[in-house]
Amino acid sequence: MILVKHFKNIIILSLLGLFLNSCNGKLPGGDARKFPDDPKLRVKKNLEEGRGFRLNTAFTPKGGVFDFASSNELWRASLDAIDFMPLVSANYSGGIIITDWYSNDVSSNESIKITIRFLTNEIRSDAVDVKIYNKKCSNNLINCEIIRTEGVLVTELKRKILKNAAILKEAKEKENKGKKTN
């Protein structure tokens, strides 16, 4: 009965003892002599030591830059280069574009499929990995052979993507310069 009556006080004393025990006998607080008087300098020192945070960076995602697909020049240039082909998959977050098999009217027994994988957002020669597959069929699309093409078509497509991406980036930079001066 007495235990129930003083239950609240027992819990408070237990938590206080646990708190003091976790502080290794030192009460929390700092030595005022170790910190500058000016609040701006204190904030700067705390941020340098990793003891604080800023609200403008507290809610930004950690781990990478996730731009919209429409602002990525490589992505836009790749879609522009293969806009005549039907797409099976276009996954911006996965960094891959896969087309469906495409055949023109001239040779219905041959078709191509293109996969474009993005290795980086920077516009450089190793930014995209282009693979082109050629499917040749005989006997009305029954016996088909699929071969990966490594020839001129891969090089030309990659060159076209990089050239268009560079043009898009230059236009975007000019547009941003115009907005800053206004």
Image (tube, rainbow, N blue to C red):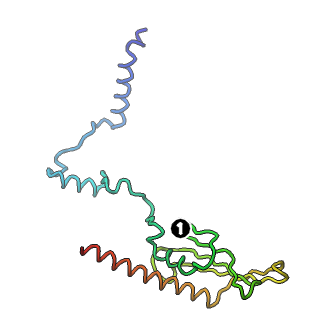
Residue 129 image offset from top left, x and y in percent: 57, 79
Of residues 35 and 153, the one nearer the viewer is 153
Dot 1: within a 10 Å radius of its alpha carbon, few (fewer than 14), some, or many (20 or more) residues?
Answer: some
Hey, which residue is sitting farthest top in the picture? 1
For residue 91, what is the image quadrant?
Answer: bottom right
Residue 22 image offset from top left, x and y in percent: 36, 36
Q: Residue placed at 40% from the left, 9% from the top?
A: 2
Q: Residue placed at 61% from the left, 91% from the top?
A: 152
Residue 83 image offset from top left, x and y in percent: 57, 78
Hey, which residue is sitting farthest front in the picture? 105
What residue does disc 1 label? 92
Please name the amino acid that badge 1 sits on.
Tyr
Hey, which residue is sitting farthest bottom in the picture? 152
Q: Residue placed at 39% from the left, 57% from the top?
A: 60
Under tag 1, what secondary structure? loop
Q: Is 73 drawn above or below residue 94 in the view shown?
A: below
The quadrant of the picture occupied by the N terminus is: top left
28 vs 114, left or right, is left
Of residues 4 and 72, the one nearer the viewer is 72
Q: Residue placed at 25% from the left, 40% from the top?
A: 29
